[in-house]
Amino acid sequence: MNPLSQWLIIAVVMVIAMALAWAWQRRHANAGIVDVVWAAGMGASALLAAATGQGDWAPRACLAVMAGVWSLRLAWHLWRRVRQGEDGRYRALREHWGGHQGKFFGLFMFQAGLVMLFSLPFLAVGTSAARGLPVALGLAIWLAALAGEVIADRQLDRFRDDPAHRGQTCRDGLWRYSRHPNYFFEWCHWFAYVALAWGSPLAWLAWLGPVLMYVFLRWISGIPFTEQQALRTRGDDYRAYQRRTSAFFPWFPKS
């Protein structure tokens, strides 16, 4: 199947999936489901590109395993949070919008568009003829990034599960060196698809992954929204954390 046909299928499926997710949100008053469907949609897009791509079997097989495992882990992690109630970021947005469902529908459709955008690196891998070193490099990057993201998430979950830490900021483990180590490793993982797309006629599309993900995490939907919520709930403690700790790239805390 050619990449354009793959992309059109992804577009149709994601619009339908996000419309159903919006209906679920309306019934349960929990917009966090949009993140779960985004993560699952990314995995489904990768599997489609891997199964129907015209490239070599090795990068396509790696794409299916790597993006499938990453997507499943992230979707499950986010679903566990959704089950605990609506995330503070979305509660604030709901209050700001006055519960306007038209605006929430626009948010869900925007996320469908993001899946269409971020699936482009997968389409590049689907046409790749890479073997040997590029495939091994992609796998190594993916393993390191996934391990870092899992460790960061578990460290934060352990911290939050302790009632004594209510109102405090996690500074344990990786969170001592970056305010958002989970975002950092999420960003790193996209370089794996750059390696897998080596030699593809669409290789340039693979670079959209790390470039766009950095822009969104650093300035649009990641760090800004997360830190606004942290300042609302943790106040001066989080301001002190901001002064001492790198926002994204891990580095030693300022004295």
Image (cartoon, rainbow, N blue to C red):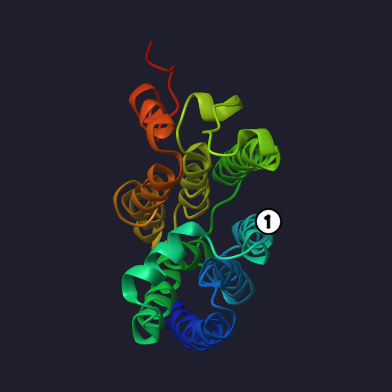
Tell me: 230 left or right of 131: left
What residue is rendered at 55% in x and 84% in y? 17
Q: Is residue 155 shown above or below 193?
A: above
Q: Where residue 82 sits in the image (x, y, percent)?
A: 62, 65
Nearer to the camera, 98 or 152: 98
Tell me: 6 left or right of 83: left
Residue at the far top: name it. 255
Tally the marks.
1
Q: Is residue 238 shown above or below 21?
A: above
Q: Quadrant of residue 100?
A: bottom left
Query: Disc 1 on helix, strand or loop?
Result: helix
Q: Quadrant of residue 246?
A: top left
Nearer to the camera, 38 or 55: 38
Q: Where residue 66 sits in the image (x, y, percent)?
A: 64, 55
Q: Where residue 81 sits in the image (x, y, percent)?
A: 63, 59
Q: Which residue is mark 1?
A: 73
Q: Amino acid at mark 1?
A: Arg
Nearer to the camera, 30 or 63: 30
Q: Quadrant of residue 86?
A: bottom right
Badge 1: how crowded within 10 Å, few (<14), some, or many (20+)?
some
What residue is rendered at 62% in x and 39% in y? 156
Q: Quadrant of the C terminus?
A: top left
What residue is rendered at 35% in x and 87% in y? 102
Nearer to the camera, 74 or 197: 74
Q: Where residue 137 sits in the image (x, y, percent)?
A: 57, 39
